[in-house]
Amino acid sequence: MRADNPSSHPVAWRRLAWQGFIALVGIAAIVGSGGGGMPGFPPCGPPLCGGEPLPPPAFVRLTPADVTVTVGAPATFVSEVENIDAPTYQWRRSNDGGSTYTDLPGATGSRLTLPAVNLGDHGARLLVQVSSGGMTKAQAVGHLYVSATPGVAYADGEFLPADWVFSPVLGPAPAPAASSAERVATGGNPGAWWRMQVQVPTGAGSARLSFLSTSAVYDPRQHGAIAAIDYAEDCAAVLPSDTAGTQSWLALEQAGRHYVANTRFASPSCAAAGWRPVASLGRLVEQDFTFVAGPACAAGEPCPDFSAAAAPLRFGFARQTFASQGQSVPHGIDNWKVTVWRR
């Protein structure tokens, strides 16, 4: 007597198909639950339901990534690594736009200093390779620019209240529901610093504060056209939180128009309790600024304008806080500095 072929009996075939469907649904339920067990089934583990979460990615940044110095001055690049155990370093240099790199002998620390640069160093690229356990984990590239004339620098490490004015133009983020800014005499990096507190308004997930310096004004008609602008500051989260964060930008006002340096740069965030530099805000050119408020720019008009005939530029900073509605977030700023490099 021959064995039955299920495919020759429609009822039996449908029964088998339904049982297969139930089995697949059960597996999907186990996978979707992240490996939880079901009555009568053993716990679900790898490879079907996955293993432990992947470790956070290895990462290195240069602070800043773009360095401009005057002829004869030292140039320093500093690397910051994340999620790399026992890192080792090797710095390399390229003089052909990054096509080829050569190891720099003895350059095996987290910081690289070129002691006295000249115009022949202009345009060099410096690459840091970070390894662990004999394997390269991450790398980052910095750019060196050399100017024949000194930059015009504006700096504030004391933050006297008379030296700053609140800028009412905040867009695109809303104004805070409540805010404060006060000078603290000790605890900065080092010494005095400015402590700000922002309360996120109802119906929003962020709020922005913006300040302009009373003295940091550059007039291209007197000092010459601008080649690029460097920006630096130290920032800190006074009370670090997993539910709140603050970002910082260079703010710029020219002829009633307001701008902030845009986000092609590595996360300028203030999330740690300790002081840290804002990352990689070097060699800012006209295209690196985002218009936020003021008179509209005409078609083809440079906004902002760095030419020798341009209106004066006033510098400051903007802070945008991301948090829950009604949450108050304190954060600090110190060692604010803008350097204008002339053409």
Image (cartoon, rainbow, N blue to C red):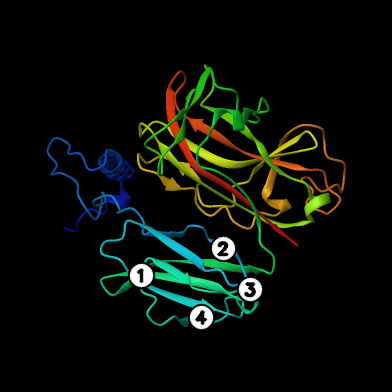
Q: Amino acid at mark 4?
A: Tyr
Q: For the residues carrying marks 1 and 4, which lies nearer the camera in this image?
A: 1
Which residue is under mark 2? Answer: 67
Q: For the residues carrying marks 4 and 2, which lies nearer the camera in this image?
A: 2
Which residue is under mark 3? Answer: 122
| Contact (Cβ within 8 Å) of mark 2 with mark 3 | no
Which residue is under mark 1? Answer: 109
224 on left or right of 116: right
Percent across and percent down for residue 185 are 42, 32
- As measured in the structure, the alpha-carbon distance from the residue carrying label 1 to the one carrying label 3 is 23 Å
Number of marks in the image?
4
Circle 2: is it few (<14), some (14-19), or many (20+) Cα within 10 Å?
some
Mark 2 or 3, nearer chain start: 2
Image quadrant occupied by the N terminus: bottom left
Which type of secondary structure does the marked residue at label 2 adopt?
strand
Q: For the residues carrying marks 4 and 3, which lies nearer the camera in this image?
A: 3
Circle 1: is it few (<14), some (14-19), or many (20+) Cα within 10 Å?
some
Circle on res. 101: 4
- As measured in the structure, the alpha-carbon distance from the residue carrying label 1 to the one carrying label 4 is 18 Å
Residue situated in front as seen by the camera: 170 or 78: 78
Which type of secondary structure does the marked residue at label 4 adopt?
loop
Image quadrant occupied by the C terminus: bottom right
Percent across and percent down for residue 251 are 64, 40
Mark 4 or 3, nearer chain start: 4
**Above or below for 92 versus 3:** below
Percent across and percent down for residue 315 are 66, 41
Circle 4: is it few (<14), some (14-19), or many (20+) Cα within 10 Å?
some
Mark 1 or 3, nearer chain start: 1
